Image (spheres, helix red, strand yellow):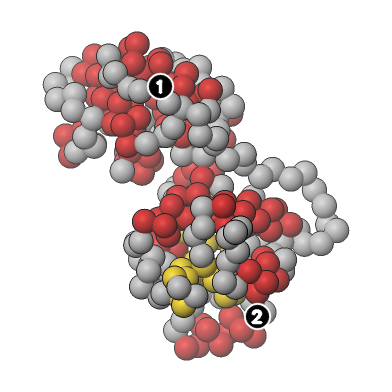
Amino acid sequence: MVFKMTYDQRNLANINKLANNTKKAALQWYQYCSEQEIDLLIYETTRTLEDQARNYRSGASQTMRSYHLVGQALDFVPVKDRKTIWNGFGSPKNKKAIAKAKQLRSTWGGDWTTLVDKVHLQYEYRGYGTDPFGSGQEAVTVPSPINVGSKTIMNIQETVNSRYGTGLKMDGKYGPATKKALIKGFQTELNKQYKAGLTVDGIWGPKTKAIVRVVKKGARGNITYILQSTLYLGGFDPRGIDGIFGTNTEMSVKSYQRSKNLTQDGMAGRNTWAKLFE
Ligand SMILES: [Zn+2]
């Protein structure tokens, strides 16, 4: 039997209200969740100014500049045994769903530090209110999800193994082992270039964090390669993993920063590296 979400009709009706590019990304996400049999209820997408004003007054929203107003956000809750589970955001299935949403370049309110909003996913597109509705068409730039067994990931694994002897299984999957190997590579490079004296253990600890240098446009070399690989694996394809920090890498860093609510300066500094390797 094919899996169907408990609230499939309501979910699709709500997704259908979203702005064009947000809708595309939401549908990709929804399809993934369905394939993975991750049941959920998308209980709200667009909101009117009136709704938002009401939420604002009641304290349910902290801002009148909500992404719901511009059709670039959805609120959802995990479902289990046909019931909504409001404290179910930490379940393995739901974590998978959120990881996928982020890979599709959505921002999750559960990552916010000032006001945690676990039900909330928003799609930045080109910023607040930039995604057109209906027939107001413009070029659609939905990021392509990374496929399991991806050649690019295998290339990264092969390169990291040959440079740093990390012995990764070349399975084309981005998992904890690949991330750890990239951190090892990063530590090795910091030791080489800055005599950092770090233990190469693949752990993103305080000593490694403290020694990080800013990498920006014009940079070349293995650290840039590691940056590009990590961006790619996070769903922010820099269009070329070549160790040369050009315009595309800068754009990819900016998109990544936007998705994490970091300053969008296009440079990989301490905060950006920290998010990438956390
Ligand atoms: Zn929301």
For label 1, being within 8 Å of ligand 1 is answered no
Q: Earlier in the sequence, mark 2 or mark 1?
A: 2
Q: Amino acid at mark 1?
A: Met
- Residue at the spot x=69%, y=53% of the render? 24
Q: CA distance from mark 2 to mark 1?
A: 51 Å
7 relative position to 185: left or right = right
- Residue at the spot x=19%, y=38% of the render? 205
For the residue labelled by badge 1, is the local secondary structure a helix, a strand or a loop? loop
Nearer to us in this view, 239 or 23:
23
- Residue at the spot x=80%, y=48% of the render? 138
**Residue 119 in view of the camera:** no
Q: Position of residue 4 (x, y in %)?
A: 60, 64
147 relative position to 210: left or right = right
**Which residue sits furthest front?**
1
Q: Position of residue 176 (x, y in %)?
A: 32, 37
The residue tagged 1 is 170
The residue tagged 2 is 49
For the residue labelled by badge 2, is the local secondary structure a helix, a strand or a loop? helix
